[in-house]
């Protein structure tokens, strides 16, 4: 089955809302779904939960999906948590005055894992082992990583997807840390690139 043709055609918004099996704390306004859909045009801030890169891999792995997952797996991002346990990791921890194991230190997990500064309820499904996963850049996926949302570019954004997250890089590639080099997007993105050669225009 081809990656692109496998998707069901888009259902009307109302049907989709009603068919959603997830309770999202919207119970009070659910009966007013029509109004909510309109008011969402202004994109009210709403926290999204993390699900983990394994969920993205269900659709973004393999030749039909441009091997996005496999490409990411081959980068240091995928091993960012493992590498905290290296000798060099121990050295950096000492230099930064961090006590205990680097793999468990919030001071390291902030940048070497995904979603670890979010409230516990929002990171219940994601594990530190996944390192710098898809959602560290594309945003927490519980609401957009769904069959009926993801393929619709506008809907996916409305549910928290950041399709072109250049701005996310410097959240971790920050200045002021001895072990972090100066960051230049133009030269660093190609080292981890996983975009399709021809953009779909979405
Ligand atoms: C149920 C299948 C499915 C899941 C799960 C899924 N995606 Fe997608 N994703 C798609 C499809 C289909 C497209 C549209 C592809 C296209 O337009 O060529 C897409 C597009 C994208 C795009 C490009 C959006 C744009 O507007 O350019 C990004 C980025 C993306 N997905 C990231 C993710 C991340 C991160 C996750 C996990 C949190 C995820 N996806 C989970 C199916 C999925
Ligand atoms: C502000 C975000 C941030 C924090 C906090 C952080 N790191 Fe890093 N770390 C990075 C980035 C970004 C890189 C990649 C370096 C580069 O390419 O410039 C990196 C690279 C590394 C590397 C591999 C590169 C090397 O120098 O060998 C290790 C090991 C490491 N960090 C350990 C740690 C440990 C241990 C802690 C906690 C004491 C920590 N880091 C805290 C962002 C961070
Ligand atoms: C370090 C940050 C980062 C991580 C981690 C990351 N991405 Fe991306 N991704 C980007 C950026 C930046 C772009 C946009 C590139 C562009 O438009 O030039 C992108 C583009 C994409 C696209 C769109 C490709 C296209 O051309 O339409 C998809 C799909 C995607 N990512 C999925 C994923 C999935 C799935 C994962 C995890 C397996 C992942 N990304 C991990 C930063 C990241
Ligand atoms: C959540 C924090 C985080 C974000 C966001 C992030 N990085 Fe990183 N990045 C790291 C860490 C940590 C490492 C070092 C991992 C290690 O060596 O253990 C790293 C390593 C790298 C490397 C070295 C890769 C390799 O395979 O050797 C490149 C290149 C890079 N990042 C580019 C980017 C770009 C481009 C973006 C934005 C699109 C980005 N990063 C976003 C944390 C982050």
Image (cartoon, rainbow, N blue to C red):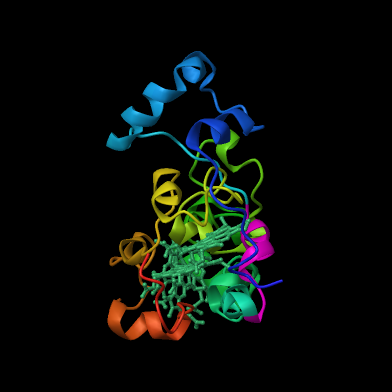
Q: Kindly indicate the quadrant of the structure image that contains residue 191.
A: bottom left
Q: Kindly indicate the quadrant of the structure image that contains residue 88.
A: bottom right
Q: Using the image as rendered, state which of residue 171 and residue 25 is in the foreground.
A: 25
Looking at the image, which residue is at 40% across and 61% down?
A: 163
Looking at the image, which residue is at 63% across and 70% down?
A: 3
Residue 58 magenta: yes
Q: Is residue 163 left or right of residue 117?
A: left
Residue located farthest toward the right when viewing the structure as drawn: 1
Residue 123 in view = yes
Residue 46: where, in percent of width, then height?
41, 33
Q: Is residue 187 above or below residue 152?
A: below
Looking at the image, which residue is at 59% across and 28% down?
A: 18
First to last magenta residue range: 52-63
Q: Using the image as rendered, state which of residue 50 and residue 23 is in the foreground.
A: 23
Q: Is residue 165 left or right of residue 136?
A: left
Can you say which quadrant of the picture contains the C terminus? Answer: bottom left
Q: Using the image as rendered, state which of residue 50 and residue 14 is in the foreground.
A: 14
Residue 182 in view = no
Q: Is residue 196 left or right of residue 128?
A: left
Can you say which quadrant of the picture contains the N terminus? Answer: bottom right
Residue 120: where, in percent of width, then height?
58, 36
């Amino acid at each position: 089955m081809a990656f692109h043709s496998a998707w069901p055609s888009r259902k009307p918004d109302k049907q989709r809302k009603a068919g959603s099996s997830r309770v999202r704390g919207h119970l009070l306004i659910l009966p007013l779904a029509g109004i909510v859909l309109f008011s969402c045009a202004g994109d009210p801030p709403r926290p999204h939960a993390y699900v983990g890169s394994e969920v993205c891999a269900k659709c973004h792995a393999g030749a039909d999906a441009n091997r996005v997952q496999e490409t990411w797996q081959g980068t240091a991002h995928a091993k960012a948590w493992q590498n905290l346990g290296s000798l060099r990791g121990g050295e950096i921890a000492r230099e930064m005055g961090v006590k205990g194991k680097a793999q468990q230190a919030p001071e390291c997990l902030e940048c070497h894992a995904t979603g670890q500064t979010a409230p516990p309820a929002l990171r219940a499904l994601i594990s530190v082992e996944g390192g710098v996963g898809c959602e560290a850049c594309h945003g927490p996926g519980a609401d957009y990583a769904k069959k009926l949302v993801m393929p619709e570019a506008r809907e996916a954004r409305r549910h928290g997807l950041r399709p072109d997250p250049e701005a996310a890089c410097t959240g971790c590639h920050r200045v002021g840390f001895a072990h972090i080099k100066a960051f230049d997007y133009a030269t660093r993105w190609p080292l981890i690139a996983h975009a399709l050669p021809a953009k779909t225009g979405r």
